[in-house]
């Protein structure tokens, strides 16, 4: 299975009710859908995120699984989860990758394209 057999879509959302702009605290949720377009089951073992805010501050996050799980995704199936991140600026960018394992135990990286975190109507 090639890494391209894993299709990842992202949907970020600003959480105004959890943010405090006057304290440089901006909270975003993001929903990720992982679609297995390949022909074998895969398991998401770990994640790596690189988060950059508008000041150029970079935060790297690595860890086991996502939202406390290491989901197994069968061919043709989707796995969707929602998580969150807070920034010191109203705009930022996230990108990263998932380490996936095939049924034979071999690993590959599934890249997550960069996506923008931004207050609504701030950037057109």
Image: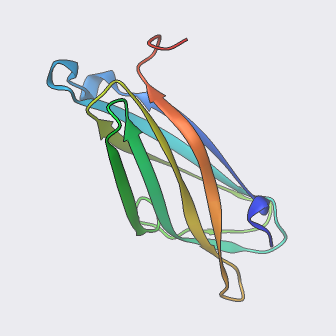
Residue at point 67%, 85% (across, down): 106
Quarter-of-image position of residue 14: top left
Residue drawn at 51 percent across, 32 percent down: 116
| Residue 49: percent from left, percent from top | 45, 54
Q: Is residue 39 rendered to the left or right of residue 36? A: right
- Residue ID at (30%, 35%): 87
Above or below 13: residue 1: below
Residue shown at 32%/31% (left/top)?
55
Q: In this view, does 40 lie to the left or right of 55?
A: right
Tell me where residue 38 sits by quadrant. bottom right
Q: Residue 37, position in %: x, y?
A: 81, 59
- In the displayed structure, 47 sits above or below 96; it is below
What scheme was used to colour the molecule?
rainbow
Q: Given the current orientation, which residue lies at the most extreme front position?
A: 56
Q: Quadrant of residue 29?
A: top left
Q: Nearer the viewer, residue 33 or 91?
A: 91
In the displayed structure image, the side of residue 78 where residue 75 appears, left or right: right
Where residue 15 appears, as percent x and y from the top left, is 35, 27
Examine the rendered structure and indicate whether residue 85 appears above or below residue 14. Answer: below
What is the quadrant of the N terminus in the image? bottom right
Q: Is residue 102 above or below residue 96?
A: below
Between residue 56 and residue 3, name the one nearer to us: 56
From the top left corner, tell me how far across and down residue 6 is, in percent: 73, 59
Question: On the picture, is 6 further left or further right than 49?
Answer: right
Q: How many labels does the image show?
A: 0
Location of the C terminus (image quadrant):
top right
In the current view of this chain or complex, which residue is farthest to the bottom? 104
């Amino acid at each position: 299975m090639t890494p391209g057999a894993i299709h990842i879509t992202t949907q970020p959302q600003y959480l105004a009710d959890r943010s405090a702009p006057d304290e440089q605290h901006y909270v975003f949720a993001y929903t990720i859908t992982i679609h297995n377009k390949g022909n074998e089951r895969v398991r998401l073992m770990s994640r790596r995120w690189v988060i950059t805010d508008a000041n150029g501050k970079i935060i790297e996050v690595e860890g086991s699984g996502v939202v406390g799980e290491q989901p197994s995704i069968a061919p043709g199936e989707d796995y969707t989860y929602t998580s969150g991140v807070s920034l010191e600026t109203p705009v930022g960018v996230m990108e990263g990758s998932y380490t996936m394992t095939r049924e034979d135990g071999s690993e590959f990286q599934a890249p997550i394209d960069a996506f923008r975190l931004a207050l609504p109507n701030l950037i057109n």
